[in-house]
Image (cartoon, rainbow, N blue to C red):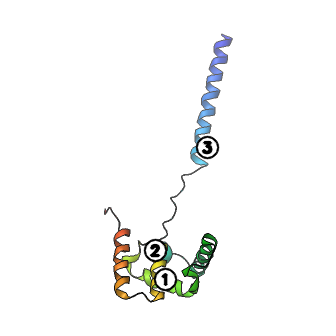
Amino acid sequence: MKKLLALTFALLLCTTSFAVAQHHSNTSHPAEAPPPIHNGLWWQSKSTTFRDGFVTGYKSGTLHTAGHAIDINQFPAIELIDGLDSFYKDFRNRNILVDDALNYVQDQLRGIPDEKLNAELLKMRAAAAPTAVE
């Protein structure tokens, strides 16, 4: 009888411990949100101060990654920011990633001809277009 009582108590203790552990694992670690997609919708939601810091950090990151000055560093941050703001005003560009948009803005600042820029823009829009429409 004592063995049956001890076994029942042990089983009850294990079951309770398991239930408490399950509860804590479900409530103390809520599901993480997916990382943001750095596109025009994301860009437009940011403040002017954030945008300035982002572009300045982006430029600095290219120096550290490449070990030497890259094209983007020849342009002032304010020109790049203005270019991105203008680029994302067109609703058709909002799904294009900031990295791609920055390359486009750099091409504009370099004086790439409009025909080439338009062809590049059409390719970026096609690549960024949503695949499923609800």
Q: Position of residue 93 (x, y in %)?
A: 39, 77
- Mark before the other along the chain sequence, 3 or 2: 3
Task: Give the quarter of the image for residue 8.
Answer: top right
Instruction: Give neighbour class at mark 2: few <14, some 14-19, many 20+ (Cα, 10 Å).
Output: few
Q: Which residue is mark 3?
A: 24
Dot 3 alpha-carbon crowd within 10 angstroms: few under 14, some 14 to 19, many 20 or more:
few
* Residue identified by numbered label 1: 106
**For numbered disc 3, what is the local secondary structure?**
helix
Q: Residue 38: horizontal and vertical position, in percent? A: 49, 69
The CA distance from mark 1 to mark 3 is 50 Å
- Residue at 63% in and 33% down: 17
For the point 35% across and 66% down, the residue is: 130
Q: Amino acid at mark 1?
A: Gln
* Separation (CA) of disc 2 from disc 1: 10 Å
| Residue 44 % position (x, y) | 49, 77
What residue type is disc 2 on? Answer: Asp
Local secondary structure at mark 1: helix
